[in-house]
Image: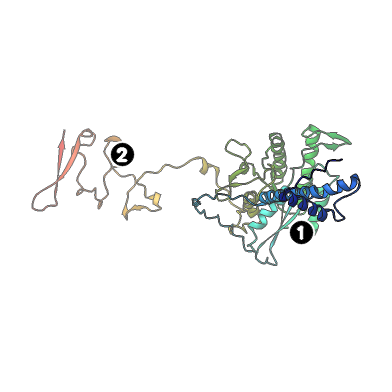
Amino acid sequence: MKPAPIRRSISPIARLLMAGLLGLAFVIGGDGLLLPGDAQAQNFFSKIFGRDKDKNAAQARQTLRKKRVQRAKPRAVKRRKAVPKKRKPVIAKKPAKPQRQTVQKAQDAKKVLVVGDFMAGNLADGLSERFSDNPDILMVARDNGSSGLVRDDYYDWPTQLVRIVGEEKPDVLIVMVGANDRQAMRVDGRARQVRSSEWNAEYRERVQAIADIAGTADIPLIWVGQPSYKFSSMNTDMLAFNETYRTVVEAQQDRFVDVWSGFVDEDGNFVFTGPDVKGQMVRLRASDGINMTAAGDEKLAFYTEKALDEALGGLISGEPALVTAPSEGLALPEVTSLTRTPVYKIDDPELDGADALFDIPVVANGEDDDLPVTSGLPPRSPSGRAADFGGITRLPDEGRADGADQQVSVRPSLGPTGSSTEAVSAN
């Protein structure tokens, strides 16, 4: 006989838990509680725990997004209390230089032609500004910045100048050239070094050719010398060039303008800044130490103006130039009158062109003419002068020679007449 199976009682709480688990498994599984095979079991647990994994990833992404947003937000900057800045004093700007008024040139205005290299262009600018308000002077510039007297293969000034003078027909010719001439020159088919004997001779001939063109055209020539430059070796050559210009131009009675002193200091050294035409310290040269500023152009024109005024017959200053009169037909002074000066007495009326002093006749060779020599006394005063004390005798009555060493004093009488005088002698 088999024993009866023992039935274990299940508590109500356990039953509820088991029912809940079965219901949950049915909801999740969908097809029933029991899933055959390992794949279905894996699918079951993955659905349970996979949602937690997705939920955790979503939370991680949301946290990361919040951090990014926080980084993107600008940090709050603590503002400092504004401190009022000190205002700088207002400095009045220097007024712009007034431009000269340009006027219409007259039909008979004198034409001044300026030729040369880039320095001639600076000079022409300064002269044009200087005479822009003068209707009687017309400035014409025909410069070539890279030209010179050495490289005639690039620009042949003697040949070109003949053509330019024929076209412009100027009243005055101004030349400023030489800044580009510090280079070898071909002489007789061979290159010669700067300032060698052959170079100097050829350069002088080319300067002379320019001067001859002005002489042939009967035009007053003004040759403006070179200024100083920043480089000492360059200045040495420029001084030698200026001496060549001077000797050639002055030999044919034309004008050489030396501008060297206007662009150096008291020791003769190059300066960037110096006094302008009004004495104010300004910048005269560009930073390269070669070119001019506007103030430098004006200073070049200032140095040239006097020579130009002479060439134009005083048209600028209004004072005509002095002209030496020819000596033909004029009586020349005697040589003897220039080598000997006649001796005059201090009281000679001929000094005033008359024969009397204050309308009082003076008798020559009088008895008292030799008294200053023999007695040492002054001569007798003419009648009517303040020094005439009644016409009394200056010497004792008994001989002048005997009493020459006596002094005579005259005092007025205090008598009732009040006009008589008394001579008193004293030993």
Q: Residue at x 65, y 57 (%)?
A: 129
In screen coordinates, is 192 left or right of 226?
right
Q: Residue at x 88, y 49 (%)?
A: 35
In the foreground, 58 or 32? 32
Mark closest to the chain's N terminus, 1 or 2? 1
Picture coordinates of residue 186, whole percent (x, y): 85, 37
Q: Residue at x 25, y 53 (%)?
A: 384
In the foreground, 139 or 95? 95
User: Quarter of the image containing the N terminus?
Assistant: top right
Picture coordinates of residue 51, whole percent (x, y): 78, 50
Picture coordinates of residue 63, whole percent (x, y): 70, 49
Q: Disc 1 vs disc 2: which is toward the camera?
A: 1
Q: Which residue is mark 2?
A: 370
**Can the viewer see residue 203 in this picture?**
yes
- Identity of the residue furthest to the right in this view: 37
Q: Residue at x 62, y 51 (%)?
A: 302
Picture coordinates of residue 44, whole percent (x, y): 84, 49
- Which amino acid, by three-letter code, is at mark 1? Lys
Instruction: Give the quadrant of residue 6.
Output: top right
Label 1 environment density (alpha carbons within 10 Å; few <14, some 14–19, many ≥20): some
In the foreground, 166 or 313? 166
Disc marking residue 169: 1
Q: Secondary structure at mark 2?
A: loop
**Can the viewer see residue 396 in this picture?**
no
Q: Secondary structure at mark 1?
A: loop
Q: CA distance from mark 1 to mark 2?
A: 77 Å
In screen coordinates, is 53 left or right of 344?
right
Q: Are marks 1 and 2 in contact (CB under 8 Å)?
A: no
Label 2 environment density (alpha carbons within 10 Å; few <14, some 14–19, many ≥20): few
